[in-house]
Image: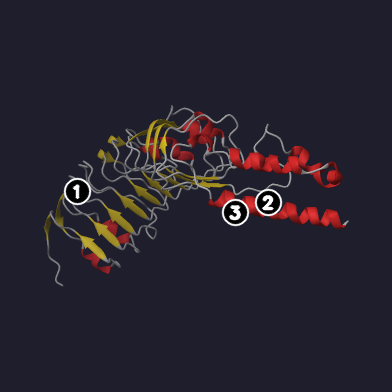
Amino acid sequence: MGRLIWFSQILCLSFMLLQFRVQSSSPSQSSLDSLLHLCRPEERSALLDFKSTTTNVFNDVTHGLKTWNKSIDCCLWEGITCDKTKDFGNNRLTGPIDHVEMPNIILQNVYLFNNEISGSIPSFFFDLVNLTSVDLSSNNLTGTITATMLSKLVYLGYLDLSNNSLLSLSNNGTSINYSFPNLQYLLFSSCNIHKFPSFLRKAEKLQELDISKNKISGQIHKWEIEGMSVNILNLAYNFLTDIVSFGFGNLEAVDLRSNLLQASLPILSTTWDSMHQLYVSGNNLIGEIPSSYCNYTFLGVLVLANNSLRGKIPECLRNLRLSILDLRMNKFHVTWKF
């Protein structure tokens, strides 16, 4: 029994040392081929070497080590617990994400932001069905992400692909009903999107959609947004010319700055106590400020500068709790007395 206890203590110590090494190691500049394995090749080799040092004297202890083999990721071996996160942001990684024969499906979080990763996101990436949080922003990724690809990641809640100037997002057809049951944050700013992602109508938990600084042009039609639920919507710095009244029931912040909007100010939400911030500066909006804007009882920021709005400024705006009201570079007839 004494020898058994001694062996168990050595085994625990070895695992602790291995865990420390896994957490403190960092990939080489071009080692993208193994990043999506929770257990890297050198870690697997160290465990297999340890297994080979055990003798038949401890067969009752090493029985569980029979699951330790090269055919599966070592994070799935009996007795091994791995962190389900890959965080290699700000690591100067270069080159493409190479093909992985057996990507680890228990991987939940991937953070590869602010590197120099190039090429398209390989198809196997979307077979990592347990992913919940992904940040690949600020790289040199190319290609197109389709609704079909994203719909495979049913547990995905956070996706940031911003600042990949050659990466696009496609609806991949409008007749198919996609489901995104857990998607809450989709950040796709400064990419190469040309059309509004209407497939997000099925993202019932969506809290923030940022597709600013893209190439979305023309009009966003009612059918493209009908049924969509979102709290924060950023469409700034695109080429939109018209946008229908959203009618979203829970909009808290909308940014439509620096587009080509030419119509009158739209009513963006009919739940008057939800809107907190509205930015529509740098467009070609005409007409007057609708008096219904005074119904936004919790509106704190209203920025309408640099448009062609005219008429009187509604007196009722003074009753709002505005911390910022920017109406510069318009054609208002000011009658307020401060």
**Residue type, label 2:** Phe
Q: Secondary structure at mark 2?
A: helix
Pointer 3: what residue?
20
Residue visible at 66% across and 54% down in the picture: 16
Q: Sequence-wise, which precedes: disc 1 or disc 2?
A: 2
**What is the CA distance from the residue labelled 3 to the residue labelled 1?**
53 Å
Which of 165 and 182 lies nearest the eye of the viewer? 165
- Neighbor class of circle 2 (other Cα within 10 Å; few <14, some 14-19, many 20+) is some
Residue visible at 45% across and 42% down in the picture: 227
Residue 316 occupies quadrant = bottom left
Residue visible at 88% across and 56% down in the picture: 1
**Residue type, label 1:** Gly
Q: Quadrant of the C terminus?
A: bottom left
Pointer 1: what residue?
282
Q: Residue 64: x, y in percent?
A: 79, 43
Q: Residue 77: x, y in percent?
A: 71, 41
- Neighbor class of circle 3 (other Cα within 10 Å; few <14, some 14-19, many 20+) is few
Q: Sequence-wise, which precedes: disc 2 or disc 3?
A: 2
Pointer 2: what residue?
15
**What is the CA distance from the residue labelled 1 to the residue labelled 2?**
59 Å
Q: Sequence-wise, which precedes: disc 3 or disc 1?
A: 3
